[in-house]
């Protein structure tokens, strides 16, 4: 595991969570909540993409897992941002459904 790639995924996850919160105000968890859920989603999303060979590991090109090239940085940002945004939307949706009276 590349620690720099993981840090990029976590940061982009926080950004993705806050961006999704800004776009989906109905599901927003607040700035801190969006950031925390985005960080978790960014780490998970980036690792899922890496396990599939699409992510920062560079498995598709046969590259070294510890290499840090432009493609791995972009895939870390994309995986983290999307993972953070998706998890924030899912958690916000669940939270919204729990608030509804039965």
Image (tube, rainbow, N blue to C red):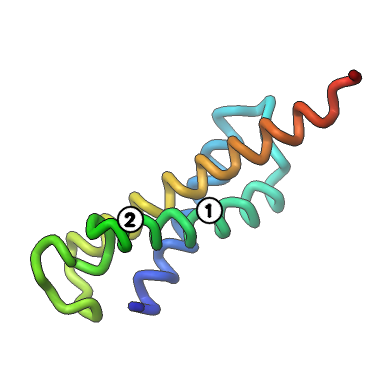
Secondary structure under tag 2 reads: helix
Please tell me how crowded label 2 is: few (under 14), some (14-19), or many (20+) other residues with Cα within 10 Å.
Answer: some
Classify 52 as above or below 87: below
Classify 95 as above or below 13: above
Residue under label 1 = 41
Instruction: Locate residue 39: give its quadrant.
Output: bottom right
For image coordinates 34% across by 78% down, the residue present is 2
Residue toward you, 18 or 78: 78
Instruction: Locate residue 1: give its quadrant.
Output: bottom left
| Residue 54 in picture, x, y percent from top left | 24, 55
Classify 42 as above or below 1: above
Please tell me how crowded label 1 is: few (under 14), some (14-19), or many (20+) other residues with Cα within 10 Å.
Answer: many
| Residue 87 in picture, x, y percent from top left | 56, 44
Residue under label 2 = 49
The quarter of the image holding the C terminus is top right
Q: Is residue 20 left or right of residue 2?
A: right
For image coordinates 60% across by 37% down, the residue present is 90
Q: Is residue 22 left or right of residue 82?
A: right
For image coordinates 17% across by 66% down, the residue present is 59
Foreground mark, 2 or 1?
Answer: 2
């Amino acid at each position: 595991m590349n620690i720099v790639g993981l840090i990029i995924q976590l940061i982009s996850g926080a950004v993705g969570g806050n961006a999704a919160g800004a776009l989906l105000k109905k599901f927003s968890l607040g700035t801190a909540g969006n950031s925390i859920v985005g960080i978790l989603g960014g780490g998970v999303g980036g690792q899922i993409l890496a396990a599939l060979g699409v992510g920062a590991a560079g498995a598709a090109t046969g590259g070294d897992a510890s290499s840090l090239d432009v493609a791995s940085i972009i895939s870390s940002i994309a995986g983290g941002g999307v993972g953070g945004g998706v998890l924030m939307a899912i958690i916000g949706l669940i939270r919204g459904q729990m608030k509804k009276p039965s």
